[in-house]
Amino acid sequence: MPSDDSRVLLDWLEAGWESIYRSLGEWTVDDLARTFPHRFRGTDYLISRQWVLWRMLSHDIHHGGQLALLLAMQDIPAFELRALGGHITEPPLLRPS
């Protein structure tokens, strides 16, 4: 859905990621291996929950790269997408035990 309003884009991203957050909060590691049949372009597949989650994540990773490139071409700073390599937050520091 095209929009010039950044809030609309944010709302769509939050809606998409809500299902991932909810699923990861409810499922166990064993649940990720559960499968279901799925027909795509006339071919039947046996899809795992893990495959679906990775497909959603990799799709967003791909578009994050596109956004970084488009912003860079317009000299728009995108520190999180470029300097941090796409990481919005830094990982926790290792604490000596």
Image (cartoon, helix red, strand yellow):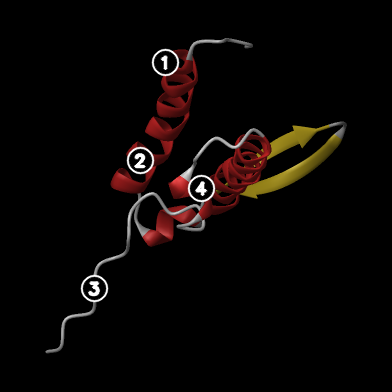
Alpha carbons under labels 1 and 4: distance apart? 18 Å
**Mark found first going from the N terminus, 2 or 3:** 2
Residue density around tag 2, few if under 14, some if 14–19, many if 20 or more, within 10 Å: few
Q: Which residue is mark 2?
A: 21
**Mark found first going from the N terminus, 4 or 2:** 2
Query: Residue at coordinates 49% horizontally, 11% vertically from top-left?
Result: 5
Q: Which residue is mark 4?
A: 81
Alpha carbons under labels 4 and 2: distance apart? 21 Å
- In front of the other: label 3 or label 4? 4
* Quadrant in which the C terminus appears: bottom left
Query: Residue at coordinates 87% horizontally, 32% vertically from top-left?
Result: 42
Mark 1–mark 2 CB contact (< 8 Å): no
The image position of residue 68, as x and y in percent, is 60, 42
The image position of residue 45, as x and y in percent, is 75, 45
Q: What amino acid is at disc 3?
A: Leu
Alpha carbons under labels 3 and 4: distance apart? 21 Å
Q: What amino acid is at disc 2?
A: Tyr
Q: Which residue is mark 3?
A: 93
Q: Which residue is mark 1?
A: 7
* Quadrant in which the N terminus appears: top right
**Mark found first going from the N terminus, 3 or 1:** 1
Q: What amino acid is at disc 1?
A: Arg
Q: Which secondary structure, mark 2? A: helix
Q: Which secondary structure, mark 4? A: helix
Residue projecting furthest to the left: 97
Q: Which secondary structure, mark 3? A: loop
